[in-house]
Image (cartoon, grey):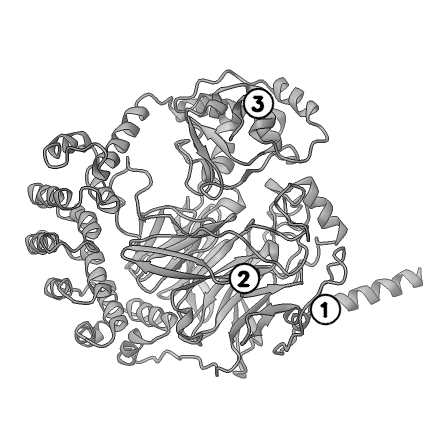
Amino acid sequence: MKKYIYIFLIIVTAILYQCKVHKQVAKAPVPVVTDINSSPIVSPEESIGKMKLEDGFTAKLVAAEPLISAPVAMTFDNKGRIWVLQMDDYMPDTLGTGENTPSAKVVILEDKNKDGVMDTRKVFLDSLVMPRALCLIENGILVAEPPYLWYYEIVNDKPVKKTLVDNKYTDGGNVEHQPNGLYRAMDNWIYNANSDKRYRKAGDKWLIGHTHSMGQWGISQDNMGRLYANDNSTNLVGDYFPPGLGINNKDQHGVAGYNERTVADNRVFPIRPTTGVNRGYMKGVLDDSLRLVNFTAACGPLIYRGNLFGKDFDLNAFVAEPAANLIKRDILHENGNIVKGREAYLGREFLASVDERFRPVSLYDGPDGALYVVDMYRGIIQHRTYLSTYLKQEIGKRDLTRPLNCGRVYKVYPTNKKLVNVTFPDNPAKLVPLLGNPNGFVRDKAQQILVDSKATQVIPALQKAIKSTNNPWLVIHALWTLEGLNAIKTDEVLNLLQSADWTIRMQALTILPSVIHKDNYQQFAQALDHIIANNDTLAAPYVGFVTNYIHPFDQKAANTLLLSLVKKHPDNLFVADAVVSNLQGREAGFQKEIAAIAPNPNLEINKRLQRVITAIENAKHNSDPKVLAKEFPKGAAIFSTVCKTCHGEDGGGVPSLAPPLNKSEVVNGNKEIMISIVLKGLTGPIKINGRLYKAPEISGEMPGFADNKDYTDADIAQILNFVRRSWQNTGDKVSTGDVSNVRKKLEGRQKSFTMEELDPSLKVN
């Protein structure tokens, strides 16, 4: 007995040593993997040593256990402290045992001795269940804890009042497909990935608006306030236009210029075998060296806006891939309104590690210009909803269930650069110059402090700043600070609309919805008409978008602007969708109105109009999902929780994720095929209504649910019946026995199906 106690104490001591904080910068040799079947828990110092970084860069530890565990998100406060969100309750084992135990936290980390490493910790909130995001604002903090969004007022680093902001922050969706982010954007709204909701505090009230839904985990903005995100198999998607525009027509799905694929390259280059990925058994997922080929867990995108890395890193994106233990760098370029990019390197990454437990999940800019990396440092990152038998076996081989008490934050920076934290003075007047700081984090934070503190005494300084001729960043952030203080004037915006600098004109156009009212709309209508007359192609889509805000005051003036846009730019895709965004309920009438000036049906304006008109007509024939939910309640609930994120609430599919279910010949066809897909999954291209859907337009695979013990055969029959009867689908009924019979036939099958396997007549050439 004494022998076993002695062995146990040795093991515990080793684990505690491995998880203690090491305050050291790595000088790493080229990392290697000596045994692909071994995945030891290592200290932060050793983990840094296992990283291969871009030449000339250094990784330094900022925080680690026992100060933090299982971190998934962080934010800096005005004092430079780091608030960390811990998802301690995520996947304690492969069954998710105890997943809903209230053990997650929000903690405050502080660097008391100013050596760059956090050394003290306060628990701000405890006993949370699966929290997803946090955001400091005014004298409090937003915390997303499904399904709720809460606001906690703060006094002396303690929560003193709890207010419910949204009781449906997450409406359905499993843990991998629920909203997150709470990103404070340039326009003073707070945005989310995987959601069409945005939030804003107005006095004691919270405003909930709507915008374009995008992404899965993580959200970021560039210097112009355009948003970027991604999903697990997609490197980077982004918007060509600011997020508050083009949201007025509820019948218009997929506005051009929003949720666009920014970087098409999805190739990744791990430096270790990555057999511990969910579909590692499938052909093409791993290469001959057992390394992941393409993104499978892309998350936490960041548009780098610091000034520390140098000019080559302007408008660069960094994307985390925790399943492959790496961070990718993408180089973006602007061409007119379009932003596209490519991966920075072929055959290597900006940062890659041979430590399998290094799990970068979120990336951030910091007050010193460094790139901050949140490392969950965990073996299991795949949620049980989609956990394959293959991955369960991989987890068992290398004991990836442990540890549950580790987590790290690192910062990456150029080795030869000195890190200097910008501090934020208490004097509001001294914050105004920081609105023009070369570090985008500093500009954002200065703007937020001024808006949060309602610093109206600096309005004269801000009004002077927007007249600056040598610093467009100062102009832009001063402008949005004035907007946040409800102090922007008509003449100021009109003057900026005439700026020779497109970046400034763009922001002046974007801010129009905040300033147009009954006493000034005529001035703005004239200014917009002048822009059209001057053939400003860059501005034309913006004119279309903001004409929405002229319409309530003067329908005729608004319609005249739209007709002028059609006449000038009938074949411009972005202008066409901007025009259509004005037309809810009157698309057919406008189509007749422009017949004389744009008669060709192949012009973009006619194609985009017809697209919405057809969708409206089709919807009239839809079965009502609300009625079907009464007949198949469990099926409707599962659809809302698991399916709608990828396939859309209307069954119309979601770009970059999944094809449509509505009117799909597969959904309406042989029920055994449909049951097989839901049980074992589907991979590869699929043809729906004559159109081929394949990666990267959609995700390469739909996971199956045969191994998920949460769903019985009766549950699967319900979801199939719900989908096969909703919208315009007319598939025959599926019984519990049907599911059970197919399950027996497929027992022992591990890999997903292809359409050709299921039905040779559905072969995709």
Q: CA distance from mark 2 to mark 1?
A: 24 Å
Q: Which residue is mark 2?
A: 327
Residue 645 in the image: state x and y as whole percent: 46, 40
Residue that lies at the very extreme toward the top in this rendered image: 732
Q: What element does badge 1 sit on?
A: helix
Task: Please tell me how crowded label 2 is: few (under 14), some (14-19), or many (20+) other residues with Cα within 10 Å.
Answer: many
* Image point (61%, 56%), residue name: 324
Badge 3 is on which residue? Answer: 759
Picture residue at 67% right of the left edge, 42% below the top: 281
Residue situated in front as seen by the camera: 11 or 357: 357
Compare marks 1 and 3 and give the one earlier in the sequence: 1
Q: Residue at 21%, 48% (x, y): give it.
A: 545
Residue 320 x, y percent position in the rendering: 53, 58
How far apart, in angstroms, are the residues tagged by discs 2 and 3? 40 Å
- Mark yes or no: residue 754 visible: yes
- Local SS, label 2: strand
Give the mark toward the camera: 2 or 1.
Answer: 2
Q: CA distance from mark 1 to mark 3?
A: 52 Å
Circle 1 sits on which residue? 18
Q: State which mark lies toward you, 1 or 3.
A: 3
| Among the 4 quarters of the image, the one containing residue 510 | bottom left
Look at the numbered disc 3 and give the secondary structure of its residue. loop
Against 526, residue 505 (above or below) is: below
